C-alpha cells in the first residue's frame, strides 16, 4: 500500500510512495485542484528525490478530485542496467573472491606485494570498462546517449584516479623518495589532456616552428619527463645556432637533475645534498642572466628552481591542482614525506584555484586522501558516486591491509561489511547479477547469511532453471527454510499449470507431506477419469520418497500393482492389492476402484485369490456399502449398484472355485 510523506498537509499536494524490493514508486497526489498537471515552474518530485532516476508520466484525472499527475519509479542502483557497468561488476567479482581466498599467512613484503597487485587488477578492470564506454560514446548516433556515455567515462576516470592515489598512499604506503616517483606516474597517467597536443607538434613537418612547440616542452618539464623535453630542445638548438650555448647549459642542468631511483641505494640525506647543489647551480645561472635573451628557456629554468609563480603561469597546461602539487613537490621538495603531503596539497589547491572557483567533490576526495583520512575518502565517495561498487571494493581492500580494523559502526557491523551488504543488495535487484551478490554475502561474517536468506526469498523464480540455481545455492549453505519455500513455490506453480509430475517432484524435494498428499490425490483423480497414469517415470522411481505421506505411499504402491499386473504376475499383484485395502493405506474413497481392479483377477481361468483372501475382499466390499443408510443407497447411481452386484457375483464364484479346488487337493 502507498504511504503519504509524514507531516504533509492533507489538504494540499502530497507525495505518496510505495516500496518495492529495489525501487520506490512515487506519485504526486493533488487535492482540490482543477486539472491534474502542475505548471511548468513546479518541481518534479522524482527528479528532486534522486537525479538520474527513471521517470514516467501519467495524465491527471477529473477536476476537483484527488488525482495522480505524475508517476515516478526511483531505482536504487540504476548502474546495474548499463552493460559496461555489468562488465565491471562481473570482472571485479572474480578479483574480490580471489582476495578473500588468498593466503592470509603471507607476511611483510610478500603480502604487501600481493595486495598491491590486487589493487592494480581492480584498476585495470576500471580502465578497460572506461575504454569500452569511450568507444560506445564515439560510435553512438544519438546525442543524448552520447552524452550519457561521456558522463560515465568521466565517472570511471575519476574512480581510477582516486583508486590509484589510494593505492599509492594506503596500500603500497610509499615512503619518502619513492612516493614522489609514484605521484609522478599517477599524474602522467591521469592528466592526459595534453597528449593530443604533443602528437600534433611531433607529427608536424617542423616541430620547432609549431605554435605549440614550447607548450609541449613545458608539459614535459612540468611532468618530469626530462628525456623527452631534452630531445625537443635539441631540435630547437639545431634550428637556432644562436641559442646553442643556452641550450647546452639548460640541457646539462636537466640531465644532472637528481632523481630518486627505486634501484639505487642512496639515502634520503645523500639525495637532498645532491639536489641542494643542483638547485644552487640552477639559481646561479638564472641570476647571471644566462637565459635572459630567451624567455622560454628562462621560464623553464625558473620551473626547475620550483618558482611557484612561474609554475602557476602554466596553469592551463597542468589543468588540475594536483598536477600543480606534484610539479611543485618535484622541483621544491622531492623527498617529501607522506605525512607532509596534506600541507602542500591544501596550499596547492588554494594557490591553483586562487579564489576564482570552489572545490568540487573530486577535490574533496583527493584532499581527504592526501590528509590520510581514509574514512572521509570512503564517506565522500559514497556521497559523490552513483553506486556502491567503488566504496565496497576499496574498503574491502583497505580492510585486508589492516587499515580499518578499529572502525566499527554504531549498530555492530564494521564499515567493510556494511558497504559490501549494500552493494550486494543492489545486485540482487538485477535478473542475473544476483548470483554475484551471493559471494559477497558469503564473505560478510556477521550479517551476510541473514541478508542472503532475506534476498533469496525475493528472487523471482521465473523458470525452473533459475529456481534450481537458487535452490542449489540454498542447499550448499544449509538454508533449509529457504529450500522448502522455493520448492513449495515451484510446486504450486507447476500444479496451477497442471504439471503434476513436476509439482510432485518439487513437493518431495520440499519434504512437504501435506502438499505431496494433495498432488497424489490429483494423480489418483486423473487416473479415475482417464484410466491411466501420467509421469510414469517419476512414480516408478519414487523409492524411499514415497514414505513422505500415506497418500504418496499408496500412489507408489498402486502404480506397482499395475506394473505387476502388466507383467502378468497376478499372484503378487493380488497380494499387493489386498494389502493396500486391509492395511488401510488406500483412502476409503478409492476402495471401489481397487475392488474393480480385483475383478479381472477374480475372472481369471486360474484361481488367484485364496479363500482367506476372498473373504477379506468380501469384508472390504461390505464395509464399503454397510455404512450407508437406505436413503443413501437409493441415491447411489445405477452404475455403482451394478458394480457392487458384479463384485458380489465374482467373489461368490471365486469362493466356490477355491473351495472346490482346495477340496480336490485335500481329497487327493
Image (cartoon, helix red, strand yellow):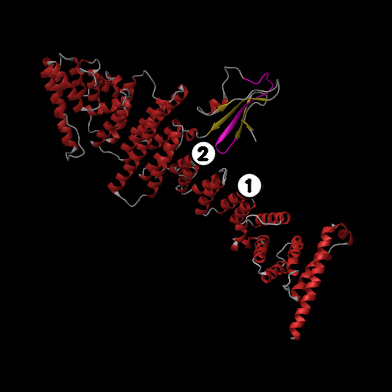
Left or right of 277: which side holds 529? right
Q: Is residue 490 visible?
A: yes
The residues tagged by marks 1 and 2 sit, at their Cα atoms, a distance apart of: 22 Å
Q: Quadrant of the C terminus?
A: bottom right
Query: x, y percentage for residue 252?
Result: 13, 25
Query: x, y percentage for residue 439?
Result: 46, 46
**Secondary-structure class at tag 1:** helix
Left or right of 553: which side holds 327? left
Left or right of 181: which side holds 463? right
Query: x, y percentage for residue 240?
Result: 13, 15
Query: x, y percentage for residue 197?
Result: 28, 21
**Secondary-structure class at tag 2:** loop
In the rendered structure, are the residues bearing label 1 and label 2 in contact, judged by CB atoms less than 8 Å apart? Answer: no
Task: Looking at the image, tell me whether mark 1 or mark 2 is earlier in sequence order.
Answer: 2
Most foreground residue, 55 or 665: 665
Say the numbered circle drawn on residue 345.
none
Instruction: Point out the residue furthest to the top here.
Output: 293
Instruction: Name the residue located 52 percent from the left edge and 34 percent from the top edge.
Output: 76
Asked if residue 36 lies in the magenta stretch, the reply is yes
Q: Which residues are magenta?
A: 19-37
Instruction: Point out the residue furthest to the front here.
Output: 605
Residue topped by disc 2: 430
Most foreground residue, 100 or 310: 100
Asked if residue 17 lies in the magenta stretch, the reply is no
- The answer to whether residue 130 is above or below residue 63 is below
Q: Is residue 307 visible?
A: no
Say the numbered circle drawn on residue 493.
1
Mark 1 residue crowding within 10 angstroms, few (<14) / some (14–19) / many (20+): some
Most foreground residue, 627 or 256: 627
Mark 2 residue crowding within 10 angstroms, few (<14) / some (14–19) / many (20+): some
Amino acid at each position: 500500500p502507498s504511504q503519504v510523506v509524514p507531516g504533509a498537509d492533507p489538504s494540499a499536494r502530497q507525495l505518496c510512495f510505495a516500496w518495492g524490493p529495489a525501487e520506490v514508486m512515487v506519485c504526486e497526489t493533488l487535492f482540490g485542484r482543477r486539472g491534474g498537471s502542475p505548471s511548468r515552474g513546479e518541481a518534479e518530485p522524482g527528479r528532486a528525490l534522486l537525479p538520474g532516476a527513471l521517470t514516467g508520466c501519467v495524465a491527471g484525472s477529473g477536476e476537483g478530485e484527488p488525482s495522480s499527475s505524475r508517476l515516478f519509479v526511483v531505482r536504487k542502483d540504476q548502474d546495474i542496467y548499463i552493460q559496461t557497468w555489468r562488465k565491471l561488476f562481473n570482472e571485479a567479482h572474480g578479483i574480490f573472491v580471489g582476495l578473500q581466498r588468498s593466503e592470509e599467512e603471507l607476511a611483510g613484503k610478500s603480502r604487501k606485494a600481493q595486495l598491491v597487485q590486487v589493487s592494480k587488477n581492480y584498476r585495470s578492470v576500471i580502465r578497460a570498462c572506461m575504454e569500452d564506454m569511450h568507444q560506445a560514446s564515439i560510435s553512438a548516433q544519438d546525442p543524448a546517449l552520447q552524452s550519457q556515455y561521456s558522463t560515465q567515462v568521466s565517472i570511471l576516470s575519476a574512480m581510477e584516479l582516486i583508486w590509484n592515489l589510494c593505492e599509492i598512499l594506503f596500500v603500497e604506503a610509499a615512503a619518502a623518495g619513492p612516493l614522489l616517483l609514484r605521484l609522478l606516474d599517477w599524474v602522467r597517467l591521469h592528466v592526459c589532456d595534453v597528449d593530443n597536443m604533443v602528437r600534433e607538434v611531433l607529427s608536424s613537418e617542423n616541430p620547432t616552428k609549431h605554435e605549440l612547440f614550447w607548450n609541449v616542452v613545458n608539459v614535459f618539464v612540468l611532468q618530469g619527463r626530462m628525456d623527452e623535453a631534452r630531445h625537443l630542445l635539441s631540435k630547437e638548438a639545431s634550428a637556432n645556432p644562436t641559442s646553442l650555448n643556452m641550450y647546452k647549459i639548460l640541457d646539462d642542468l636537466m640531465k644532472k637533475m637528481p632523481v630518486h631511483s627505486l634501484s639505487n641505494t642512496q639515502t634520503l640525506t645523500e639525495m637532498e645534498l645532491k639536489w641542494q647543489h643542483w638547485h644552487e647551480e640552477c639559481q646561479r645561472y638564472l641570476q647571471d642572466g644566462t637565459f635572459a635573451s630567451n624567455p622560454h628557456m628562462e621560464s623553464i629554468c625558473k620551473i626547475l628552481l620550483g618558482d611557484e609563480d612561474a609554475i602557476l603561469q602554466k596553469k592551463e597546461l597542468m589543468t588540475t591542482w594536483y598536477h600543480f602539487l606534484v610539479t611543485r613537490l618535484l622541483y621544491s621538495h622531492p623527498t617529501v614525506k607522506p605525512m607532509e603531503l596534506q600541507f602542500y596539497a591544501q596550499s596547492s589547491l588554494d594557490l591553483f584555484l586562487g579564489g576564482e572557483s570552489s572545490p568540487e567533490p573530486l577535490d574533496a576526495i583527493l584532499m581527504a586522501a592526501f590528509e590520510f583520512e581514509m574514512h572521509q575518502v570512503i564517506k565522500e565517495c559514497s556521497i559523490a558516486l552513483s553506486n556502491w561498487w567503488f566504496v565496497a571494493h576499496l574498503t574491502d581492500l583497505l580492510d585486508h591491509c589492516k587499515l580499518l580494523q578499529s572502525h566499527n559502526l554504531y549498530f555492530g557491523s564494521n564499515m567493510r561489511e556494511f558497504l559490501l551488504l549494500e552493494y550486494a543488495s543492489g545486485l540482487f535487484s538485477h535478473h542475473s547479477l544476483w548470483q554475484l551478490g551471493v559471494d559477497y554475502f558469503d564473505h560478510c561474517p556477521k550479517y551476510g547469511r541473514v541478508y542472503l536468506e532475506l534476498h533469496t526469498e525475493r528472487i523471482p523464480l521465473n523458470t525452473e532453471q533459475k529456481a534450481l540455481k537458487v535452490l542449489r545455492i540454498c542447499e550448499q549453505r544449509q538454508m533449509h527454510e529457504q529450500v522448502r519455500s522455493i520448492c513449495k513455490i515451484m510446486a504450486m506453480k507447476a500444479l496451477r499449470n497442471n504439471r503434476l509430475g513436476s509439482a510432485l517432484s518439487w513437493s518431495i524435494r520440499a519434504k512437504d507431506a501435506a502438499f505431496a498428499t494433495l498432488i497424489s490425490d490429483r494423480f489418483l483423480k486423473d487416473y479415475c477419469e482417464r484410466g491411466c497414469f501420467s509421469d510414469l517415470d517419476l512414480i516408478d522411481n519414487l523409492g524411499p520418497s514415497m514414505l513422505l505421506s500415506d497418500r504418496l505411499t499408496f500412489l507408489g504402491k498402486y502404480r506397482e500393482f499395475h506394473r505387476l499386473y502388466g507383467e502378468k504376475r497376478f499372484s503378487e499383484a493380488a497380494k499387493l492389492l489386498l494389502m493396500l485395502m486391509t492395511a488401510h493405506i488406500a483412502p476409503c474413497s478409492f476402495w471401489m476402484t481397487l475392488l474393480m481392479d480385483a475383478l479381472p483377477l477374480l475372472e481369471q481361468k486360474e484361481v488367484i485369490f485364496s479363500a482367506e483372501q476372498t473373504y477379506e475382499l468380501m469384508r472390504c466390499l461390505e464395509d464399503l456399502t454397510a455404512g450407508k443408510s437406505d436413503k443413501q443407497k437409493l441415491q447411489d447411481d445405477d452404475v455403482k449398484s451394478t458394480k457392487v452386484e458384479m463384485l458380489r457375483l465374482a467373489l461368490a464364484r471365486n469362493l466356490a472355485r477355491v473351495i472346490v479346488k482346495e477340496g480336490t487337493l485335500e481329497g487327493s
